[in-house]
Amino acid sequence: MPSTEASRLTARLHRRIADFLRARKLAPSRSVLLVGISGGPDSVALLHALASLRPSLSFRLHAAHLNHRLRGNESEADAGYVRDLCRALDIPLTIESAEVEAYRRRARLSLEEAGRHIRYGFFATVAKKVGAQAVLLGHTADDQAETVLMHLLRGSGLGGLRGMEAVSAWRGASGATLVVARPLLTTRRRETHDYCTAHRLAPRRDSSNRSLKFFRNRVRLELLPALRSYNPRIEDALLRMAEGASHADDYLKEQVAALWKSLATLSKEGISLEKDAFAKLPLALQTVALQRALAHLRGNLEGIEWEHLAAMREIAAGPAGRSTSLPGGLRFEAGYRELTLRREAPPQAPPPSETPLAVPGAAAFGEWSFTAKLTAMPKSPRPSPNVLWLDAAWAERRLTLRVRRPGDRFTPSGMRAPKKLQDFMVDAKLPRSLRDRLPLLCADGAILWLVGLRASALASRPKAGQRALRVTLLVGLH
């Protein structure tokens, strides 16, 4: 490459990266920038350009390289090249190795997904250790075009069509967080290759990039060349579509952000959306609200496809009790007034068929714990759904805890006629998931109390000062 052309290319790339860092305030004076480097042309060009910008922008650099151990000696040679390059550029380097294949089998992910999970987790660890506020990656405009096309083929929806963001937040399953910045996202791949040639950097070539077993490689090596016969500038068309999708998606996210506090309730268990308010939203805003809830719990939307969002909208519009499992160990369920997105609890052993409750005494029933004791009836007992006051005579009966059985009936307090237990639970809007686990306090087989929900008409209270039986729910869902 002629020296004049090389100088122009270098100046253009340096200016583009410097403007990116200044515009996003990623490189304040004396800050540390972490650069993820594979040894390929894109990341090598990025690292070299940043090294050249250090004096003028007054930041410090730290490089990070993860050896995936997937290509044997070739992977080791990549690590050696990166080590030599960082030494020549006077850049401190952290290198680690990972067994990506073993992790892929354990997590049941594709090799590409497994590599990304481990790599970003590694970057997050190094960033925290060296005090870097972000990791800079060498993704280019060509990578962006491929990503958009992959998302289009998968039917990822508007959010997927925007592709990668110039700056985004990543959160791992362990809770680790990371700011990911992509300064070369408007730079074409041929520019980074030419930059490396101009500076005699001789980057590594990853032989796995030619393997057609990977989806991205098939898109790059087979589909895009075929599409160029229809549009020689197909990459430019995909990038324009990504920009338009990004503008539309940003607007929808702003609309959801404005109403989020009135729509969503956050708790340790998950996120609840007010059902009626959600139903009144346009479908586009419903989708973005669901994506926001998913991203809040998962840290990202990896593995969330359009069909998952469509299934969630269908459940939201349907009757209470319907639910669906989602990637990342989440469950979305429709209640009577709320839509709940939560992490799925590990399977629980079913409660025992029946457990006796002695007086005085204590009993465990599934995830619930109870005590029973005789005491004086207070004048004004504090109302509590977890306490049942009974006449002391009930202590002479056989008290048991059990779950519902087919044909169960009881007479709710305040009513004269018995009612099917199933009908009462439905009318009380008790979640379907709780109906077969809710303890019933029985005396000689007769239902005295739907624990935490409603007492039977049989369970009359004694008068103040009289001897009374107090049954208390200590631990449970209520």
Image: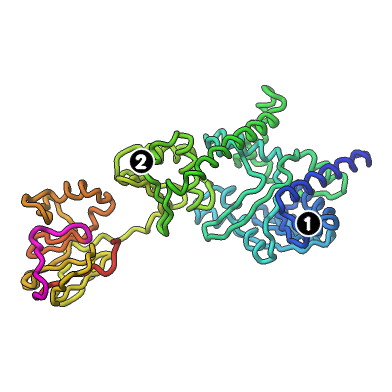
Q: Residue furthest right?
A: 3
416 in the magenta segment: no
Residue at the disc numbered 1: 81
The numbered dot on residue 217 is none
Magenta range: 452-467
Please count the marks in the image: 2
**Residue 354 image point, x, y percent:** 16, 64
Above or below, comparing residue 276 to residue 47 in the picture: above
Q: Could you tell me the amino acid type at mark 1?
A: Tyr
- Callout 2: few (<14), some (14-19), or many (20+) C-alpha neighbours within 10 Å? some
Q: Residue at x 31, y 60 (%)?
A: 348
The CA span between labels 1 and 2 is 59 Å
Above or below, comparing residue 368 to residue 416 in the picture: below
The numbered dot on residue 276 is 2
**Residue 201 image point, x, y percent:** 84, 50
Above or below, comparing residue 160 to residue 328 in the picture: above
Q: Quadrant of the C terminus?
A: bottom left
Is residue 74 in view from this perspective? Answer: no
Q: Which secondary structure lies at badge 2?
A: helix
Q: Residue furthest top?
A: 230
Q: Which secondary structure lies at badge 1?
A: helix
Q: Residue at x 51, y 54 (%)?
A: 105
Q: Residue at x 35, y 47 (%)?
A: 338
**Residue 204 image point, x, y percent:** 77, 49
Q: Residue at x 50, y 51 (%)?
A: 296
Q: Nearer the viewer, mark 1 or mark 2?
A: 2
Q: Could you tell me the amino acid type at mark 2?
A: Asp
